């Protein structure tokens, strides 16, 4: 497994990720060029090896909102600052949802990932079971 340490960007789009193998324990860093990047865990300005949203999460690391002044991502998890960066984890919730968010996070991630797959491939995403 790889631990993402840094996003590469031209200021408008993400062009790749710099990571370390073995969950971040390897000394050598590897660059992965990318057309799009999905953060499955983390927050604004940071990438984490494990989720920042445990069962009693406060949420809001990359909060989604219709208005850019209220959240850094839109309702589909697309980061407003870079055209091809998407977030698909519990940090999208603008605040705590008051219960264990596990199923809500899974549902949101599946929904957003399906839409992203359709956008990237120009093909219908497989049906969610």
Image: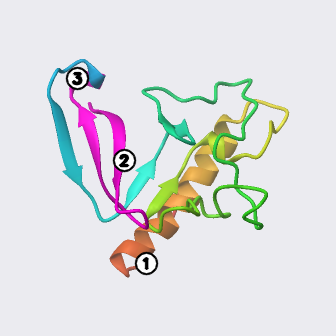
Quadrant housing the N terminus = top left
Residue at the (38%, 55%) spot, across then down? 37
Q: Which is more foreground, mark 2 or mark 1?
A: 2
The residue under label 2 is: 7
Which type of secondary structure does the marked residue at label 1 adopt? loop
Residue at the (27%, 41%) spot, across then down? 18
In the displayed orientation, state which residue is furthest to the bottom: 122
Name the N-terminal-most of marks 3 and 1.
Answer: 3
> Can see residue 39?
yes
Residue 105 position by quadrant:
top right
Residue 21 position by quadrant:
top left
Magenta-drawn stretch contains 36: no
Instruction: State whether residue 52 is above or below residue 30.
Output: above
Name the N-terminal-most of marks 3 and 2.
Answer: 2
Label 1 crowd (10 A; few <14 / some 14-19 / many >=20)? few
Q: Main secondary structure of the magenta part?
A: strand
> Can see residue 126?
no
Residue 89: image tag? none
Evaluate if marks 3 and 1 touch, with contact meaning CB atoms under 8 Å apart.
Answer: no
In the displayed orientation, state which residue is furthest to the right: 98
Label 3 crowd (10 A; few <14 / some 14-19 / many >=20)? few
Residue 22: image tag? 3
The residue under label 1 is: 124
Q: Which is more foreground, mark 3 or mark 2?
A: 2
Which type of secondary structure does the marked residue at label 3 adopt? helix
Q: Is residue 82 left or right of residue 64?
A: left
Label 2 crowd (10 A; few <14 / some 14-19 / many >=20)? some
Per the rendered image, the range of residues in magenta is 1-23
In the displayed orientation, state which residue is furthest to the front: 11
Instruction: State whether residue 59 is above or below residue 11.
Output: above
């Amino acid at each position: 497994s790889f631990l993402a340490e840094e996003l590469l960007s031209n200021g408008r789009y993400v062009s790749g990720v710099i990571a370390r193998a073995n969950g971040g324990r390897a000394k050598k860093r590897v660059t992965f060029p990318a057309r799009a990047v999905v953060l499955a865990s983390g927050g604004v300005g940071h990438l984490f090896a494990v989720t920042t949203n445990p069962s009693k999460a406060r949420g809001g690391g990359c909060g989604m909102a219709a208005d850019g002044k209220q959240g850094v991502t839109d309702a589909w998890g697309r980061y407003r600052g870079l055209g091809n960066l998407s977030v698909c984890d519990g940090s999208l919730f603008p605040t705590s949802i008051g219960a264990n968010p596990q199923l809500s996070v899974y549902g949101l991630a599946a929904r957003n990932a399906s839409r992203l797959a359709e956008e990237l491939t120009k093909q219908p995403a497989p049906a969610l079971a």
